Structure formats: C-alpha cells, structure tokens
Image: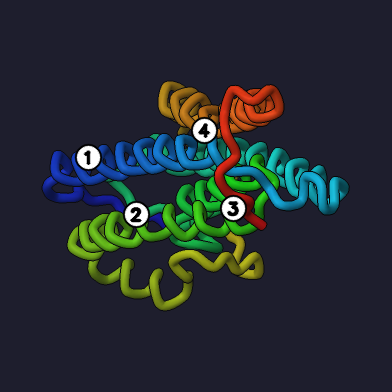
Amino acid sequence: MLETSMIPDQQHLRRVQFVRKAALAAGILIALIGLSVTDSIWRLKAPFIYDAIEHIGVLLILLCICGRTWSTLYIGARKKSELVTIGPYSIVRNPLYVFTLIGAFGIGAQFASLAVAVAMTLAAAAVFRTVVAREEAFLAAAFPAPWKVYTARVARFMPRPSLWRDTDALTIKPSLVVRTFFDACLFAIAIPAAELIETAQAHGVLPVLALVP
C-alpha cells in the first residue's frame, strides 16, 4: 500500500544523505590506505581459503550492484513523496542500505580477510545507524499512521521474504536508476585496487607491516 504526502525539510534530508555518502567514501579511502601495508594470513597458510574469500567478495559486490539498482526501481519516482512498501521494501525497510552492507563486506573480502570484511561492514553499519534514524524520523512525521503499521510489520535491516508484496506496474525514474547503478559500480573498484596492492607488495613496492586473518 502506498500513501502519498510531502516529507518536510527535504533539503535537510538531502544533506544527511550527502554526509552519509561522504563518510562512506572517506572510510573506504582510509581503509585502502591501511590495507596497503597489510596482507592476509591465508595467502601462504591456506591459498584455497585466500582465493575462496576473494571470489565470495566479488559475488557479494555484484549482488550489491544488482540489489541497489533493483531497489531503486521501486523507490525512484516515489522517493520523498510516498511511503513505499512494495517489492524489496515489503520485506525490509532499508533494502538500499542492506545491499550496501553486503557490498562493504565484499570490499573487505577482496583483501582475502574475513576480519577486514567484518570490520568494514560494521563501520558502514555505524554510519548508517544515525542516517537511517534521521531518515525514518522524516517518514514518521510525514506518514504517522501508515508508518506505525509498516514498522510494526517490517524490520529495519533484517529481510523477511515471507512478507513479499508487489505491484502490477511501476513508475520508474530512469535517471535515478542509472545514477544508482553507476554509484554502486564504484564498489567494484575494490577488485582491481586489491590486485594492485597485492602486486605492489609482491614486488616490494609496498611493505607488509601486519598480517590479518
């Protein structure tokens, strides 16, 4: 079910979302700098585990790209003017963020380290915690009655596929879908970045100061 209304203070909400993106970008940059002088303990100890973690990471990054684009198909033309409760939004309140967390884990996994993957996921979740709280405050103010029903049924981050609801037709905003797709594709930069760091370390260009599991 969709309820239509205008969300107040949309400029403030846009600023919150911009800060979220900036914080994530800065965090990833800082992480890459730190990871440039570390290596996975699995490289020599268990190469098959090393490769498996990397491959799983690639799959999760692809899932993130597809999932974020899919979610935007449902919310693109309705964002900030309607409470969307169909498609991915029928099983979890924040599918865009859920897929981003999956992508964050995938980025960490490119360094063949479960510890790094978990750390990056938790760091992203910490950023989202404040942002999501503010965004949901806007939705609660704009759609008080339907929002109360929606939050009682659908969890913030834990999907429940059994709640799936869909519609026969969607109004899509192509420009937003395309922008979301290319934004999500930035996660894939971690793949060549990790390979570049690995090559630089192998040739002694970058030192290995620590091993991580």
Mark toward the start of the polypeptide (1 vs 4): 1
Q: Give how far across and how far down residue 71 sits, in percent.
A: 52, 44
Spatial separation of the CA atoms under disc 1 and disc 4: 18 Å
Kindly report which numbered mark, 4 or 2, lies closer to the viewer in this rendering: 2
Kindly report which numbered mark, 1 or 4, lies closer to the viewer in this rendering: 4
- Residue drawn where x is 34% and y is 62% of the image: 129
The residue closer to the viewer here, 78 or 106, is: 106
Q: Residues within 10 Å of mark 3 (few under 14, many from 20)?
A: many
Q: Which residue is mark 4?
A: 184
Q: Which residue is mark 2?
A: 127
Q: Which kind of residue does numbered mark 4 sit on?
A: Ala
Kindly report which numbered mark, 1 or 2, lies closer to the viewer in this rendering: 2
Q: Which kind of residue does numbered mark 1 sit on?
A: Arg
The answer to whether residue 199 is above or below residue 98 is: above
Spatial separation of the CA atoms under disc 2 and disc 3: 16 Å
- Residue drawn where x is 24% and y is 65% of the image: 140
Q: Residues within 10 Å of mark 2 (few under 14, many from 20)?
A: some
Decide: marks 1, 4 in contact (CB < 8 A)? no
Helix, strand or loop at label 1? It is helix
Number of the label disc, if any, that sits on residue 117:
3
The residue closer to the viewer here, 171 or 117, is: 117
